[in-house]
Amino acid sequence: MATAEQPQGNTLQLALATGAFALCFAVFGSVSAMMPILKERLDLNPVQVSIAIATPVLLGSLGRIPLGMLTDRYGGRIIFAFVCAASIVPALLMGWVSSYAQLIACGFFIGAALASFSVGVGFVNGWYPPARQGTALGVYGAGNIGQSLAAFGSPLLAAGLGLAWGFWAFGAALVVWLGLWMLLARDAPRRAPARSFAETMQPLRDRMSWVLSLYYFLTFGGFVAMSIYLPTFLTEMFQLTPSDAGRRTAGFVVLATLVRPVGGWLADRIGGRKILLWVFPATAVMSVFLACPSIITFTIGALGMAAAIGLGNGAVFKLVPQYFPGSVGAVTGLVGAAGGLGGYFPPLVLGAIRQSTGTYTIGFLLLGAFALVCWGVCTKRE
């Protein structure tokens, strides 16, 4: 039974946080899911598409650092409520976008939804003991399924109800969940006084916080980059319809999401580093499959990468409370920001490569090379 000194878990709070993150992720994911349609309506070139896809990731990445620190200091309940409210407004405004400038502006602020991740990690972590944090954070991270909801649902809603509902539906759902959150969410009992700003910043000077950031730059960054760019890959490379591309993207997201709790569970038992030593080379191999110009090899590469980076995401966030038990929010903000930036730069690079060479091949091979760099760093850690 849970005690005030050492909470042993709280299923309701975990479910509330996971649902809030899933709907935030759906709001964020609606931009990339709708991009094939917006590309035609606004007559965008590949670089413009890449910038529009990457823009929400910018605020979603950098915003994780201050939000994580605020969560450590003030608790996740009020901070998560603020982030949800800040995500609803641009989701509604996206329904009226009629120019590229409006798309970039609304897309930037919709990135607040992606930044919610670091808030939920600090919130959930407080409710679980160290031996169960990997599993609990893996379950919370399964809120990535929101990207799948958007990839599958937004094009269907747009086709049936009009373009605006591809954005409004998830914004409305988040309004409802915000109401539930305010009624039922509670912060875990604090086991120590609130930390000062200087104390909160201290762990960010530790080398290991930056090593974990490197790992998450690949695993979560790879997930974000693939999930937001897959509709564009599939419609441009293989001439699929937006709905078909959305279904395939949803499959990628579902697989990556389902194995993330498995990664956390395995990390609780055998250690996160051991899992990452397999994840990084597997990601490199799958990158080669993606580079092959065939729908069959591309599908193998995408699904294989989904499994690998999903396991990696769960493993990394077992390591965060293991190395920094008293500063989970702050370090999660840094590591999460790195992961978000890992989803920001690849679309820009891929768009430039596509425009200059006509293919994405070099970009996929660069991803594989970076995975091998991460593997090299991981082999040197004791």
Image (cartoon, helix red, strand yellow):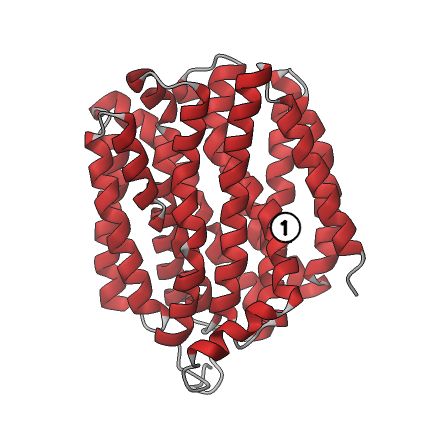
In the figure, residue 307 lies in which quadrant? Answer: top right
Q: Position of residue 217 (x, y in %)?
A: 58, 48
Front residue of 59/193: it is 59
The residue sitting at 40% across, 20% down in the picture is 242
Q: Is residue 320 visible?
A: yes
Residue topped by disc 1: 312
Q: Is residue 105 above or below residue 139?
A: above
Q: What amino acid type is highlighted by mark number 1?
A: Gly
Q: Position of residue 13 (x, y in %)?
A: 37, 66
In the figure, residue 68 lies in which quadrant? Answer: bottom left
Front residue of 92/180: it is 92
Q: Position of residue 265 (x, y in %)?
A: 62, 59
The residue sitting at 55% across, 28% down in the picture is 350
Q: Position of residue 302 (x, y in %)?
A: 60, 31
Q: Quadrant of the C terminus?
A: bottom right
Front residue of 86/241: it is 86
Q: Is residue 317 above or below residue 35?
A: below
Left or right: residue 51 versus residue 288 is: left
Q: Is residue 249 above or below residue 279?
A: above
The residue sitting at 57% across, 50% down in the picture is 260
Left or right: residue 71 versus residue 271 is: left
Query: For mark 1, does the 10 Å Cα neighbourhood hold few (<14), some (14 to 19), or many (20 or more) residues?
Result: many
The residue sitting at 49% across, 48% down in the picture is 340
Circle 1 — which element? helix
